[in-house]
């Protein structure tokens, strides 16, 4: 290995060689592996209660582990860790490398994170596409899970290989690939506890499960929202009754549901009413939102598949100020109803007053609001003093003692990381680094921040405009994935 001070910038030739290697390996090895991965309906336990019996999660874990081991990375060891009653985790380790300066960098660890579990199918897929039928078209790999987040483990190993082919130094690297992220990472705290001693002295966390404002530059995620999800159910009868007989005497469970939700949300504006679900937005995040808004302009909202027109020209979003939109989707709480029960299909909807209405709620929380506390507050708000003495229950997702997921606000960037991120963005994208908050949730980040408060965080991903994770026609932008892989390699070799 060539001895090189990891604090020195890469030469232009070294950066090009990283990019060339990543480009080739994606075409030869990653795209084929992800094509097979997409075909497996490895739904997260929240969406597949029989995941153990079905074996799909075990299959994608075995496939990914086998692929990693087949790469023959020098010194790499891999273990599929299984704790009783929990989803499995892939844990791999690569020792520090760098010739004469290896000893100097071996005390620090880079943690690389991803997940292999998936969201459910959803509807609305293009006729020639489907969640489990991968298709590679015009540089986009369609199908569920490729971008969120199956590519992560393959890109992580490729980044390490790209460094080693040039003899570039890197610290000790461990990989943590879970299979419960889409269920709120409820198993992850137990694994972090069990593996903490093996993680070592974490200097940098590279999380490859986030998004990008566009496909033209490297984007660093500066914050993530938390989330409380669960089922709100309103029961007014024990069975359905002829609506001509009961309506006007028995209140509609749907109307009661509306009243209960009015405690939580202003339906005219979408603003969440309890102040405890809000937090002060840090000044630096507002400034970064302004810079991102200047780069992205009205594409911030026009990229959405509006029903009033695909180009978004006639859309009326919550605001037409790009700064406000970015802050709304990253630093302000919002409520979504993501599922419903108690409703017959339209063709079977008779004249019956339904006995109950149930909604699946998804409450996104600002990064600085505690998810568990918010869960308990939401339950009390929705259940207390039910209208008409109806039976109103809210069952939040999660395990006892760990309800809800807390968001994350990134620590200040160390000078070395600030420099190398910009260098990597310019080298591989031809544009400076972008900073953007994300509206999604990655529970691992707040967990690792608490466990390793001095660690630096590189949170990034391939989920750019129209990639549509969780929805129909999800795709992975392969060109962006290639450049991101090279950028990650460049950052890792600079880690002290």
Image: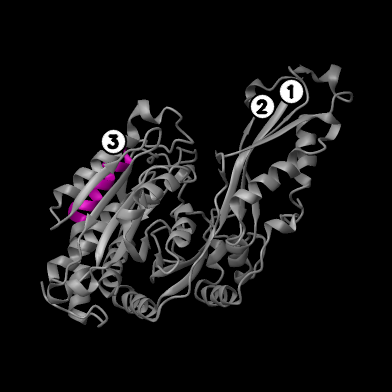
Q: Earlier in the sequence, mark 1 or mark 3?
A: 3
Q: Residues within 10 Å of mark 3 (few under 14, many from 20)?
A: some
Q: Is residue 341 visible?
A: yes
Q: Residue furthest front?
A: 197
Give coordinates of residue 403: x percent, y percent.
57, 44
Q: Which residues are magenta?
A: 27-39
Precedes in sequence: disc 2 or disc 1: 2
Residue 142: give x, y in percent of width and height: 36, 47
Give the dominant element type of the magenta stretch: helix, strand or loop.
helix
Q: Nearer the viewer, mark 2 or mark 3?
A: 3
Element on which disc 2 rests: loop
Q: Which residue is mark 2?
A: 342
Q: Number of callouts in the render? A: 3
Q: Which residue is mark 1?
A: 355
Residue at image position (78%, 25%) is 236
Q: Which mark is residue 467?
A: none
Q: Residue furthest left?
A: 1
The one nearer the camera, 469 or 282, is 282
> For residue 340, which quarter of the picture?
top right
Q: Is residue 100 left or right of residue 426?
A: left
């Amino acid at each position: 290995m060539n001895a090189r001070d990891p604090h020195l910038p890469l030469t232009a030739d070294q950066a090009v060689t990283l990019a060339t290697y990543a480009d080739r390996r994606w075409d030869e090895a990653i795209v084929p592996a992800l094509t097979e991965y997409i075909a497996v309906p490895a739904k997260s336990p929240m969406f597949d209660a029989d995941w153990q019996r079905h074996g799909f999660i075990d299959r994608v874990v075995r496939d990914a582990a086998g692929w990693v081991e087949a790469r023959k990375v020098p010194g790499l060891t891999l273990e599929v860790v299984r704790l009783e009653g929990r989803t499995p985790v892939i844990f791999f380790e690569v020792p520090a490398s760098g010739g004469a300066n290896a000893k100097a960098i071996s005390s620090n660890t880079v943690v690389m994170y991803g997940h292999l579990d998936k969201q459910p199918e959803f509807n609305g897929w293009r006729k020639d596409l489907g969640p489990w039928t991968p298709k590679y078209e015009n540089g986009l790999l369609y199908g569920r899970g490729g971008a969120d987040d199956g590519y992560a483990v393959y890109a992580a190993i490729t980044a390490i290989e790209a460094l080693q082919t040039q003899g570039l130094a890197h610290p000790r690297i461990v990989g943590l690939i879970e299979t419960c992220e889409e269920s709120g990472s409820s198993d992850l705290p137990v694994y972090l506890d069990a593996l903490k001693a093996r993680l070592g002295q974490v200097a940098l966390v590279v999380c490859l499960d986030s998004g990008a404002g566009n496909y033209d530059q490297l984007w660093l995620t500066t914050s993530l929202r938390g989330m409380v999800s669960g089922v709100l159910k309103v029961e007014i009868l024990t069975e359905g009754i002829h609506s001509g007989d009961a309506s006007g005497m028995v209140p509609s469970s749907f109307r009661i549901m509306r009243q209960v939700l009015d405690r939580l949300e202003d339906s005219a504006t979408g603003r969440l009413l309890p102040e405890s679900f809000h937090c002060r937005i840090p000044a630096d995040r507002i400034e970064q939102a302004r810079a991102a808004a200047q780069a992205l302009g009205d594409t911030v909202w026009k990229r959405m598949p509006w029903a009033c027109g695909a180009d978004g020209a006639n859309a009326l979003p919550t605001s037409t100020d790009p700064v406000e939109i970015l802050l709304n989707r990253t630093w302000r709480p919002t409520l979504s109803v993501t599922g419903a029960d108690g409703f017959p299909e339209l063709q079977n909807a008779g004249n019956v007053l339904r006995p109950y209405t149930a909604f699946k709620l998804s409450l996104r929380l600002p990064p600085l609001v505690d998810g568990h506390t918010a869960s308990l507050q939401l339950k009390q708000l929705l259940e207390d003093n039910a209208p008409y003495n109806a039976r109103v229950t809210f069952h939040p997702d999660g395990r006892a003692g760990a309800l809800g997921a807390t968001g994350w606000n990134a620590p200040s960037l160390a000078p070395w990381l600030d420099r190398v991120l910009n260098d990597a963005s310019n080298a591989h994208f031809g544009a400076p680094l972008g900073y953007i908050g994300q509206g999604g949730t990655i529970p691992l980040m707040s967990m690792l921040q608490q466990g390793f408060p001095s660690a630096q965080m590189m949170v990034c991903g391939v989920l750019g405009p129209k990639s549509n994770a969780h929805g129909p026609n999800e795709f992975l932008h392969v060109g962006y994935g290639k450049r991101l892989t090279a950028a990650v390699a460049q950052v890792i070799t600079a880690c002290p």
